[in-house]
Amino acid sequence: MISDEDKERVRQATDIVQLVGETVELRQRGREFWGCCPFHHEKTPSFKVDPATGLWHCFGACSEGGDVFKYVMKRENLSFPDSIRYLADRAGIELSEDKSGARGPRKNRLIEALTLADDYYHTMLMRGRGEGPAAARAYLAGRGFGSDVCRRWHLGYAPGRGSLVSYLRGKCYSPKELIAANLAVERSGRLADWFYDRAMFPIHDEQGRTIAFGGRILRPANNAPKYLNTRDTTIFNKGKHLFAYDRAKETMAATGTAIVCEGYTDVIAMHEAGFTNAVAALGTAFRIDHIWLMERQRVSRIICMFDGDEAGQRAAERAVQFIDKTSASMVCVVLPNGQDPMEFLSSHDAAAMQAQLDAAVPLMDFVFTKRLAGYDLSAPGRRVKALDEMAQLLAPLKNSVLLDEYATQLADALGMDVAETKRVIREKPVKESEPEARERRREGAARTTAPSMAPVAAAPYLGDEDDYAPVPDDYVPADAYDGGGAPVAAAPTNATSFSVSRMLSGDERMQVAVERELLSMLAAMPDEVRPYADRLADVMWADARHEGMAWAMLATPEGTAPADVVAAATAVEPDAPQILSSGRVVSSPGMDAREKVAFLVDSVELYSCKRRVREAKARLRQAGDTGGEDAEALFEQATALQKRINALTKKLSAVVEQ
């Protein structure tokens, strides 16, 4: 398809040092240039470029090497012929390709047609008369985009009704070319415009050439999507291009930071406010190819600006899977009051936006905080269910070196055993996201169907690999009473309850057991427990139902009969009789009732303090290097709690030894 002569012309016109130097920091050593390999992560340069031979090679982990064409194939994910065309475009060389094969329209013809369409749409917006162009101008003006902005971004209006087809046919473009560029579609044997009655946003390649469009509907119509984008073509792939990348790449390279927004108007608003390193995905979910595209500009920090709505939360969760696939740090900003960047900038200046960007939090911390805030974690069973659902989120990282860090963070947040948390995560299959599934179905991709990531009922692991069953919200494992040397006796266990309860941390299991023992004492001898009400007020209860029952029983008058105390607990918690009957009220050897109550209160406080310390340490890890007053306060809190733990441990040990 491409002659050897053309291939050599392209090779001779390409400076390999300049080509590689666009994305790799090279340093000269003698006649050669060295840098860190762009195809795998490394800290010590092992990537060599030899300008004399025009060859490159990595002496590190990937051991890749080749000429300029192989480099472009790797960097841009192109076929060999397309790598030649890519470099020919850079060098301004017109290839005389053999057209005897069944190739389809030449790329330069498609780009020319798209450029003419861009001009046509822009002219219709700026000079068009009638209801359609007026509606487009009103829509853009309502977003703060006056005529100057429309000119700078070459925004447009697509009237439809075959007007673009007619215009381009008059410029000698064939139906095959218009369809190949996705400017037109064949309907009922006739050629029709692909975009109809929409505000148009041109999409450019890295060199600034028009390769696609995004169209925003102006008047709602039945089954019409809000945004319609150019389908994938021979010159455009929505999963590999970013809106405004051609404008943003220089600032990305200069600052080392990229800002990823969710929409075209958000990107334009950001650029107009001076944030010229902003880009957006093109009608598809954020993908690893987008990250690699930004990494070519030596980006070390990617700020994801997701909308504050549910869709923005889902977008953030989808982006989590890429955290371990890039050397760039991924952070997240959610603007206040659910605003998007365009809305925020309409009422705030650039300094206010910069303050929001400066306050960006690590992506995983944001996702954890938002997701966990939606769970009721008041009972152990609910925490087990939360673990099951959160494990699906972390499943793409099951083989990552980052799993230990995130599994520990999740276990600390839920009061779970770290090893069990890792096991649950590793057992989760990595599922295809719903947006990807929809896109795959829409594009008709010929590959095996993967399960959708639609919400499913939580089903924690209960036994064998294929044995799954739902866990009640109020589930408390029977072997929570397994003391392992603790001052309370073990209750009967079974295999199923053990499978679930082992997910809980040891402190969580023991606190549940001690709480129930104390509640049983409170039901049988309420007046013995009343003096400890102030201490119990400071306890971080492992089960919120236990706390409600405790205060209902303590609220009864002195001298109340045990049956009436149980009735008070049952009034606030229907399962109170079952819970209260699970404790032992007989005195332990060497302890009278009063001593045992004191022992149980000390034990509850001990485990409560341990859980509080774990929580404080988790928040300190999350704070990382940011430090500040919050970190100092957390450190002081953890130190004070640890002192109390030491005192209680010493006191309880002395009692046990007696």
Image (cartoon, helix red, strand yellow):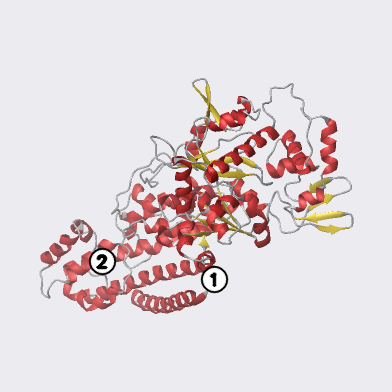
- The amino acid on which the numbered mark 2 sits, given as a three-letter code, is Glu
Tell me residue 196's x, y (percent).
49, 35
Q: Is residue 13 above or below residue 296?
A: above
- The amino acid on which the numbered mark 1 sits, given as a three-letter code, is Thr
Q: Quadrant of residue 370?
A: bottom left
325 horizontally vs 310: left or right: right
Q: What whole-number distance in Å separates the C-alpha atoms at marks 2 and 1?
A: 35 Å
Tell me residue 237's x, y (percent).
60, 39
Using a 10 Å C-alpha cutoff, classify the residue at mark 1 as few (fewer than 14 neighbours), some (14 to 19) or many (20 or more).
Answer: few
Nearest the viewer among 298 and 560 is: 298
Nearest the viewer among 383 and 154 is: 154
Q: Which mark is residue 626?
A: 1
Tell me residue 99's x, y (percent).
74, 24
* Residue shown at 69% from the left, 38% from the top: 78
Tag 1 secondary structure: helix
Tell me residue 230's x, y (percent).
55, 37
Residue 521 in view, yes or no: yes
The residue that label 2 is drawn on is 547
Tag 2 secondary structure: helix
Instruction: State which quarter of the image contains the N terminus.
Output: top right
* Residue shown at 26% from the left, 63% from the top: 546
Instruction: State which quarter of the image contains the C terminus.
Output: bottom left
User: Which is more foreground, mark 2 or mark 1?
Assistant: 1
Is the residue under label 1 in contact with that under label 2 (CB below 8 Å)? no
Count of numbered circles in the view:
2
Nearest the viewer among 236 and 553 is: 236
* Residue shown at 36% from the left, 66% from the top: 486
Q: Earlier in the sequence, mark 2 or mark 1?
A: 2
Q: Is residue 8 above or below residue 145?
A: above
